[in-house]
Amino acid sequence: MPEPLPTLDEIRAHLDPYQVTHLGVTTAAVLAEARAAIHERKAAGLHGEMGFTYLNPDRSTDPSRAVRDARSVIVAARPYLTDADPERPAETLGPHARVGRYAWVDHYAPLRAGLRSAAKLIRAAGHRAVAFADDNSIVDRAVAHRAGLGWFGKNANLLLPGAGSFFVLGSIVTTAEYQPNRRLAPDGCGTCTACFAGCPTDAIIAPAVIDANRCLSWVMQKPGSIPHEFRVAIGDRIYGCDDCQDVCPISVRLGQRNTVELPDEVGAWVDALALLAADDEWIEARYGSWYIAGRDFDILRRNALIVVGNVGDPSDSRVHDTVERYRFGPDRLLAEHAEWAAGRLATRRPARNSTRNSAPITP
């Protein structure tokens, strides 16, 4: 005998231990606006050869392609902002690379676990239900928008009213029928354009339109050579970029209303020299939850070489030896980026006879 279908309030309570703070419901109808936008931007080349939901827009914008005969989509948001940021490692420890907030720990893992557990309750009532989080089966921001969780900010992130954008999103697609939220969240950006000015590479080309070819988050994930015009802008980043969120008044002012506690050890910083000295198994064990195309960890090594060039101490022998090893190593891609790093370090080396560094001359 099937169990009674859990109410939305019961599902919300069930997700509380997983620190899910926002829940919404929409129908399983095709996400027509998102589909049109994806096709348009893909045709214009704005996807930067990105796969994910761009890979098959007709599938990723149709929940019934994920679960046959789907009627409802339950959408959940889990915050990843913390009360206090980990301190930056001391410069004496060598160049350290910055990680985007959402990747400090795997925030999708508890969200996915909670959604899967809630989906079991729905299946126990005799319905099909499948959980999705960080999955190319469905455009998570578009379905969350239609479920009333938030609006599309000018930086293309979903902004939740009174909370901001520091959230990971997931959903349950089910054949069960739940009452959908018919009200969309009103646009709260108004005339603010802080994210336009805050993007280090001018990747926001129109409200809620991102040129992925210029977005550092994708530039650092995309295989191949990093265009020269973005290498200095990468700065000390190795994975992810938070700049358009860090300057958003709503996310900065209201984000602290929804925070999570982090474990004692988090991956907010990466020791660039240690990574460049490590094998694939070491990198996989520490950063395996990150999206890395083809599981090719040379992508992270490439990024680390850019970071070393940008923030490494030019007088540090460890920095010099690491760069030289890759300059003359067998991998052409890494050798190219090491060559750039060497040149960048040379331009950052203080002049030996500069007035600022010389002792004063006394009569």
Image: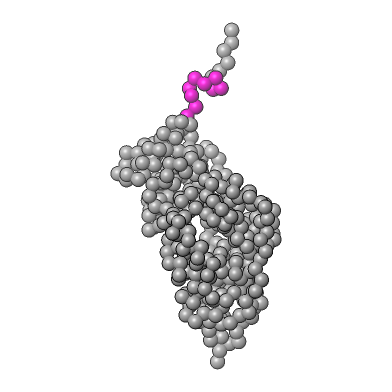
Q: Is residue 342 left or right of residue 172?
A: left
Task: Give the x, y percent position of residue 76.
Answer: 59, 69
Looking at the picture, tell me which residue is in the foreground, 104 or 28: 28
Q: Is residue 223 left or right of residue 157?
A: left
Magenta segment, principal secondary structure? Answer: loop
Looking at the picture, tell me which residue is in the foreground, 276 or 150: 150
Task: Give the x, y percent position of residue 362.
Answer: 59, 10
At horizontal 44% and vertical 46% (from top left) the residue drawn is 303
Q: Let me know if residue 291 appears in the view.
A: no
At horizontal 49% and vertical 82% (from top left) the residue drawn is 69
At horizontal 56% and vertical 89% (from top left) the residue drawn is 2
Task: Give the x, y percent position of residue 86.
Answer: 59, 49
Q: Is residue 210 magenta?
A: no
Q: Is residue 280 left or right of residue 137?
A: left
Residue 192's place in the image compared with 147, above or below, is: above
Residue numbers of the magenta segment: 349-357
**Residue 361, quarter of the rendered image:** top right
- Quarter of the picture holding the C terminus: top right
Q: Residue furthest top?
A: 363
Residue 227's place in the image compared with 348, above or below, is: below
At horizontal 55% and vertical 92% (from top left) the residue drawn is 1
